[in-house]
Image (tube, helix red, strand yellow):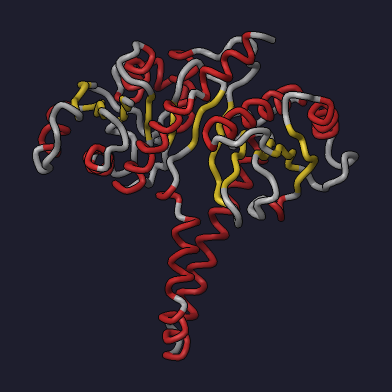
Amino acid sequence: MRVALDAFGSDAAPYPEIEGAVLAIKEELCSQVILVGDEQIISSELSKYYYDPARIRIEHASERIEMGDSAAASVRSKRDSSMVRAIALHKAGVADVALSAGNTGAMMSASLITLGRMKNVLRPAIAVVFPTQDSHEIILDVGANVDCEAQHLMQFAIIGSKYYEYFFKEKRPRVSLLNIGEESAKGNLMSKEAHKMMAESRDINFVGNIEGKDVIAGITDVIVCDGFVGNVMLKTVEGVGFSIFQILKEQINKDWVAKLGAMLSYPVYSYIKKKLDHTEYGGALLVGLNGISVVSHGRSNAKAMKNAIRFAARIAESGFVEHTQDYFERL
């Protein structure tokens, strides 16, 4: 699988992207990485590494979309940006997937303009793979659509179900609607209507509402919500995880007994940290598009970029996009 990587997306670009690409090739995570961005800078940094030059190539782009840039405006004004060029390479068939750790809004705008929305899909969404106590779950939308209608949530449920089915190779994944209560009568009008539509659908395995306290319990496979709720929930969980480790660190440093206990419990702490570490997971997939666009975390290091390349290649290999296109075209 060929990955077009925006080499000037992350906060520390292009260093994490370049090192991550080299690691990905060495670990055989994809067949080729196309680094898109300033050719002179990328070439200079690449010269520090030993790699197969046939499997990492450079596509020059003279501009860069910054994190603070306006999403839609920057896509229109910076046509030769590394992000836009990476997506264009995917559109042209030169790459099987486009990947960036840059501005999420700009990545969504550029992908929608370049790749287009799937036929009969009302709105694209942002889907993330999230760790749970048992395994993983897919949550969507986590930021693309602040205001939604019930029919949008219904489509998110179908897309999320197919995503889980083809990515994790499990038939009929459990689909839940994020709500303020488990009862079907709970929630606002949109939630009640969406619940009714999902319960009546034969295309998904709908198991009912799920509350916020059960998001990481592993009792479902796909969680559906609007982009406002999803984004707040995702960042809250990330913040809580970070705060817990900070509190533990402060308490451990207070006396030698706590330090001794921490040393004995290190394997447990290490496992939990790895399970919650965003660098272990590839990033967010923009679903509902005629192509594969993946957004990684802006704070990504080389390890995170390597795993993002692994994730992007797996998406392309899964056939998820093709199967989802076929479903909606038959509607």
Q: Residue at x 53, y 64 (%)?
A: 243
Q: Residue at x 33, y 22 (%)?
A: 86
In the displayed structure image, the side of residue 96 where residue 171 appears, left or right? right
Task: State the image coordinates of residue 21 (x, y, percent, origin top left).
Answer: 25, 37
In the displayed structure image, the side of residue 320 where residue 47 appears, left or right? left
Q: Residue at x 50, y 12 (%)?
A: 116
Task: State the image coordinates of residue 291 (x, y, percent, origin top left).
Answer: 46, 19
Task: State the image coordinates of residue 188 (x, y, percent, origin top left).
Answer: 83, 36
Task: State the image coordinates of residue 160 (x, y, percent, origin top left).
Answer: 62, 31
Q: Residue at x 30, y 27 (%)?
A: 64
Residue 43 lies, with reference to residue 212, above or below; the image says above
Give the residue at the far right of this rendering. Answer: 185
Q: How many marks?
A: 0
Q: Kindly indicate the quadrant of the structure image that contains residue 190.
A: top right
Residue 301 lies, with reference to residue 286, above or below; the image says below
**Quadrant the N terminus occupies:** top left
